[in-house]
């Protein structure tokens, strides 16, 4: 019997220039492509995901010369860093194309020759302005005048005057075919607002485009006329053909071309939505289905760019959080078409509220309860409760919606729907108060059913979230005792009732660390104590992972666990700063029957004078520790708020040493 072939999905990112390191803006496009590629695999598609580097042209030639390197040497260095970053971000590309690869260079020459043979390329003379930073030819009247220089209207950088023999591409002949394309296929450019911009640009008339340079040597030579170098954008755009085997692997090429989705930033939309389809039409290739022009990530309301000095290094975030919170934040915070302003506060808020609280706590609590109350396996979940149908039905509806939204590249909306469901599962759990049911053996069947149902819902959430957070969702999946990987089952095959009786739940692992803003903002500082009511022995550095575990399991400690803590009222007798520290105070605290020396990290909020004579809560039976050379014999309780430790002092009179319970 003939094997039915799977539908295909071919997605690309722009290929990144190698003049500099990659920042969050570049990571953004690549993360979107990765999420959509993973979602399409779960839809049963055979996916090809292409990314890579744009290594030729004047910009790279210049950057390399400034660094005293050969262009290829510079490219080799940057490529190593790019590959490292994509690994750290869990990017699952199928091929990484470099425009210096021989198969690419040959492919570009083959197309160039074909267009020349067809008469769409002719020789002439170019005189006009050129923006090296954007690698863009500007018409005579386009550049702006600034301080006696001509500057690029797009990036504001100085332009150069170019006057040289060159080959032109007959772009003007494609005005009508392009307008027809936009008319017939409104989804060719997305979002629709960008389609309007592109169409009105083309309607104003198109001039023929210079597609070679003689004064630039770093590039692909024109076949048969090597003193001309092929224009870097003509070269680069063809990566989308050569990256899937044009000229080298015909079978693969035919399998995946035309591309389903070219993801690009709005600044390079014109190259992709005007020049690219015109080149393809001239070459007789089928046209890509969609070019999606996404918005920019701004910092302080300005596009992130090296020259403005406002770029954010993804590693600054990765080292605290790993890949998933960054992946989640970038696609959750704004719809793909719009600009977003990156703020550390907004990032932390999302991570703490959506990931650590809503999702992390749900998983941690449910799994810990199954382990504590059922030794990790529910063999007999008991009869279904009337309310359970809503959870199952809610999931079925969610799955349909989320899958349709992923299909429509509306990742942020898919996440909104998934979070609405997470909230409903949290309510289900809170409404049944399983921790109370656990107190009486007669409630055991009901308790088993509730936890079983919650685990089934978590498994469903995990499956739907896998494209966005593959690493954390794989961990949850594993803790649920699943034998297969979360992406081994398609969305269409996934069944809420696939969570089986007797599945063995493993000890939950920390998922999302909580990090304080001040630690996040201060380079090189390890993350520390979680937000919310917490204990501080001052600047004790707690690794993110362990603080998350502690926080997330707090709901379900037993009273016996709590009783182990000896909490007492302490009266501060003396307070002084610990020398050479920013915020450590050494306190002498009266515990009624004895005096203790305690070191606390509260000196950035309180002066020593203002806290002397106040009464607070102390953990009296904590093992002593030495902090910055000073012994601390216990710990005071404080709430962490906005990165500061705030001490709850007693308002009414209470005797030092009184038990707190
Ligand atoms: N080399 C060309 C692309 C050739 S594709 C055939 C290029 N490279 S780039 O490195 O300058 O930019 C690559 C992509 O990163 C572009 O889509 C650009 O929009 C995107 N971004 C760069 N800074 C960005 C932000 N601050 N925010 C979002 N995306 C941004 O152009």
Image (cartoon, rainbow, N blue to C red):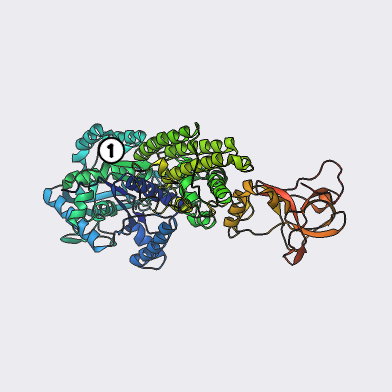
- Is residue 134 rendered to the left or right of residue 458? left
In the image, residue 148 lies at what x, y percent? 42, 48
Q: Is residue 181 above or below residue 589?
A: above
Q: Is residue 139 visible?
A: no
In this view, the residue in front, 141 or 471, is 471
In the image, residue 64 lies at what x, y percent? 38, 64
User: Where does label 1 land, which residue?
Assistant: 188
Residue 538 occupies which quadrant of the picture? bottom right
In the image, residue 555 lies at what x, y percent? 63, 46
In the image, residue 302 lies at what x, y percent? 49, 44
Using a 10 Å C-alpha cutoff, classify the residue at mark 1 as few (fewer than 14 neighbours), some (14 to 19) or many (20 or more): many
Q: Is residue 431 visible?
A: yes
In this view, the residue in front, 49 or 282, is 49
Q: Is residue 594 above or below residue 174?
A: below
Say which residue appears at 36% left-offset and 54% top-offset: 92
- Is residue 78 rendered to the left or right of residue 574? left
- Is residue 94 rendered to the left or right of residue 620? left
Q: State the residue lying farthest toward the front.
A: 442
In this view, the residue in front, 243 or 641, is 641
> How many numbered callouts?
1
The residue carrying mark 1 has its beta carbon less than 8 Å from ligand 1: no
- Secondary element under disc 1, as helix, strand or loop, is helix
- Is residue 392 rendered to the left or right of residue 588? left
């Amino acid at each position: 019997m003939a094997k039915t072939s799977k539908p295909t999905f071919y997605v690309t990112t722009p290929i990144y220039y190698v003049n500099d390191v990659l920042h969050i803006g570049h990571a953004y496009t690549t993360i979107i492509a990765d999420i959509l590629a993973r979602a399409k695999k779960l839809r049963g598609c055979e996916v090809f995901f292409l990314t890579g580097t744009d290594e030729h042209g004047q910009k790279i030639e210049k950057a390399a010369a400034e660094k005293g390197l050969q262009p290829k040497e510079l490219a080799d260095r940057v490529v190593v860093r790019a590959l490292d970053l994509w690994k750290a971000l869990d990017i699952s590309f199928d091929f990484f194309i470099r425009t210096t690869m021989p198969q690419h260079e040959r492919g570009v020459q083959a197309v160039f020759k074909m267009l020349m043979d067809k008469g769409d390329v002719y020789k002439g003379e170019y005189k006009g302005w050129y923006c090296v930073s954007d690698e863009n030819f500007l018409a005579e009247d386009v550049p702006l005048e600034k301080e006696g220089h001509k500057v690029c209207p797009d990036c504001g950088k100085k332009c150069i005057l170019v006057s040289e023999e060159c080959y032109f591409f007959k772009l003007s002949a494609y005005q009508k075919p392009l307008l027809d394309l936009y008319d017939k296929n409104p989804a060719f450019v997305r979002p629709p607002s960008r389609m309007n911009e592109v169409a009105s640009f083309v309607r104003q008339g198109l001039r023929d485009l210079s597609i070679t340079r003689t004064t630039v040597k770093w590039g692909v030579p024109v076949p048969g006329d090597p003193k001309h170098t092929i224009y870097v954008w003509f070269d680069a755009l063809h990566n989308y053909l050569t990256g899937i085997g044009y000229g080298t692997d015909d079978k693969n090429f035919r399998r995946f071309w035309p591309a389903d989705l070219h993801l690009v930033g709005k600044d390079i939309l014109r190259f992709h939505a005007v020049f690219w389809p015109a080149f393809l039409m001239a070459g007789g290739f089928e046209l890509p289905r969609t070019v999606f022009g996404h918005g920019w990530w701004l910092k302080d309301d300005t596009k992130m760019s090296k020259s403005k000095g406002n770029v954010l290094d993804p590693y600054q975030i990765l080292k605290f959080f790993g890949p998933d919170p960054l992946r989640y934040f970038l696609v959750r915070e704004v719809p793909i078409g719009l600009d977003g302003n990156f703020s550390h506060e907004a990032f932390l808020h999302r991570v703490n509220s959506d990931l650590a609280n809503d999702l992390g706590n749900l998983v941690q609590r449910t799994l810990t309860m199954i382990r504590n109350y059922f030794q990790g396996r529910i063999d007999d979940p008991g009869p279904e409760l009337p309310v359970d149908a809503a959870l199952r039905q809610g999931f079925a509806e969610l799955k349909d919606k989320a899958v349709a939204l992923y299909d429509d590249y509306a990742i942020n909306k898919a996440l909104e729907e998934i979070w609405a469901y997470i909230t409903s599962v949290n309510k289900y759990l809170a409404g049944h108060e399983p921790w109370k049911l656990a107190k009486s053996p007669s409630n055991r069947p009901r308790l088993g059913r509730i936890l079983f149902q919650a685990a089934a819902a978590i498994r469903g959430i995990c499956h739907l979230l896998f494209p966005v957070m593959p690493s954390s969702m794989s961990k949850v999946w594993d803790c649920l005792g699943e034998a297969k990987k979360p992406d081994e089952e398609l969305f269409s095959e996934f069944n809420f009732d696939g969570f089986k009786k007797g599945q063995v739940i493993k000890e939950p692992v920390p998922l999302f660390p909580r990090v304080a803003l001040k630690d996040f903002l201060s380079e090189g500082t390890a993350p520390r104590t979680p937000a919310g009511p917490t204990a501080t022995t001052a600047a004790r550095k707690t690794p993110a992972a362990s603080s998350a575990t502690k926080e997330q399991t707090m709901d379900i400690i037993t009273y016996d666990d709590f009783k182990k803590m000896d909490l007492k009222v302490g009266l501060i007798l003396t307070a002084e700063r610990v020398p050479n520290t920013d915020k450590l105070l050494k306190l002498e605290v009266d515990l009624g029957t004895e005096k203790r020396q305690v070191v606390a990290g509260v000196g950035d909020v309180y002066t020593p004078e203002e806290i002397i004579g106040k009464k607070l809560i102390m953990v009296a039976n904590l093992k002593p520790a030495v902090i910055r050379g000073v012994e601390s014999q216990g710990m005071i309780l404080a709430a962490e708020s906005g990165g500061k430790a705030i001490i709850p002092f007693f308002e009414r009179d209470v005797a030092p040493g009184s038990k707190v319970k």
